[in-house]
């Protein structure tokens, strides 16, 4: 099959330094592992999983071999503690995994590795070697005007793609006063504070968001994660990301 080059371009208004600093993130040609945790502050079983995710901050493979994301779900909010980081969209993403047959059920804590349920975490929480599958390079640039993402894939299907951009929060501490974790101070990292998804809009696979912002200056925002999926399928094809400390205050 003749190689196809897919171009995904997302423009997001950002308030960056006047001196024109640019951040660049890029994946290798082989697939970067996307680690997803679905969690809740209202779930008494979740703190150990949250602590394990926090340990990844100090792993030398971070951003190079794997990209962690923590989605706080809302379906336990009725137990007495409404998780302040929960969103219906996060719960929907987990349900989509189950609907596609990539998970047996919806529960917390729930881990996924490259779009597949990682139930082995409960027995042996050790990351395996990254995939050797060549899924193409995803590169991201953030400058004064825009966030631009380019995805170059070889031998890729013709289905429409989606680009996903998440702002991640770190060093978050919550004093829980109700629910199953009442009386505990919970700590979180890699928390999805904002998540934008853009579907295919035209034949040349270019996306644009005008007059919008990722709000990188919001409290606790320290990193960004970007990944590509086929439309209507949550499975990540490629991912990249990194720290944004040098620009998040602007």
Image (cartoon, rainbow, N blue to C red):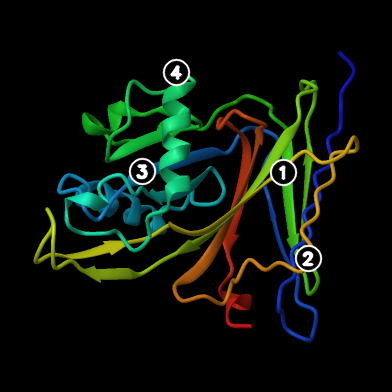
Q: Quadrant of residue 211?
A: bottom right
Instruction: Look at the image and tell me whether residue 107 can be seen.
Output: yes
Q: How far across and down, in percent of the image, does residue 16 sit?
A: 71, 79
Q: How much space separates mark 3 and mark 4, taking CA atoms?
A: 17 Å
Disc 2 target residue: 146
For mark 2, does the 10 Å Cα neighbourhood hold few (<14), some (14 to 19), or many (20 or more) residues? many
**Residue depicted at x 45% and y 39%:** 92
Of marks 1 and 4, the one in the foreground? 4
Of marks 4 and 2, the one in the foreground? 4
Instruction: Kindly identify which numbered label has been placed on residue 101.
Output: 4
Q: Residue furthest left?
A: 183
Residue at disc 1, secondary structure: strand
Of callouts 4 and 2, the N-terminal one: 4
Q: Quadrant of residue 190?
A: bottom left
**Residue depicted at x 36% and y 29%:** 118
Residue at disc 3, secondary structure: strand
Of callouts 1 and 2, the N-terminal one: 1
Instruction: Kindly identify which numbered label has been placed on residue 58.
Output: none
Of marks 1 and 3, the one in the foreground? 3
Q: How far across and down, in percent of the image, does residue 71 sit?
A: 41, 49
Q: Give the vertical position of 55 relative to 231 (above or below).
A: below
Label 4–label 2 contact, CB within 8 A: no
Q: How far across and down, in percent of the image, does residue 222 sit?
A: 51, 69
Label 1–label 4 contact, CB within 8 A: no
The residue closer to the viewer here, 166 or 125, is: 166
Q: Give the vertical position of 135 relative to 248 (above or below).
A: above
Q: How far across and down, in percent of the image, does residue 52 sit?
A: 28, 49
Residue at disc 2, secondary structure: loop
Q: How much space separates mark 1 and mark 3, taking CA atoms?
A: 24 Å
Q: How much space separates mark 3 and mark 2, taking CA atoms?
A: 30 Å
For mark 1, does the 10 Å Cα neighbourhood hold few (<14), some (14 to 19), or many (20 or more) residues? many
Disc 1 target residue: 138
């Amino acid at each position: 099959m003749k190689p196809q080059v897919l171009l995904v371009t997302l423009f997001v208004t950002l308030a960056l330094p006047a001196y024109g600093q640019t951040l660049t993130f890029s994946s290798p040609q082989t697939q970067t592992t996307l680690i997803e945790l679905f969690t809740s502050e209202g779930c008494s079983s979740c703190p150990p999983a949250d602590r394990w995710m926090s340990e990844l901050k100090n792993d030398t493979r971070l951003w190079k071999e794997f990209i962690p994301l923590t989605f706080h779900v809302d379906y336990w909010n009725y137990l007495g503690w409404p998780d302040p980081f929960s969103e219906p969209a996060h719960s929907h993403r987990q349900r989509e995994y189950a609907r596609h047959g990539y998970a047996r059920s919806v529960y917390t804590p729930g881990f996924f590795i490259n779009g597949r349920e990682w139930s082995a975490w409960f027995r042996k929480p050790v990351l395996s070697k990254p995939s050797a599958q060549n899924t193409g390079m995803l590169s991201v640039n953030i400058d004064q005007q825009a966030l631009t993402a380019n995805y170059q894939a070889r031998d890729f299907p013709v289905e429409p793609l989606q680009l996903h951009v998440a702002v991640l929060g770190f060093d978050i501490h919550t004093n829980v006063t109700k629910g199953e974790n009442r009386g505990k101070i919970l700590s979180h990292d890699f928390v999805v504070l904002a998540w934008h998804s853009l579907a295919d809009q035209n034949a040349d696979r270019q996306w644009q968001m005008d007059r919008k912002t990722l709000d990188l200056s919001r409290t606790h925002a320290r990193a960004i994660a970007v990944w590509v999926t086929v439309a209507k399928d949550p499975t990540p094809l490629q991912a990249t990301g990194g720290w944004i400390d040098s620009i998040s205050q602007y």
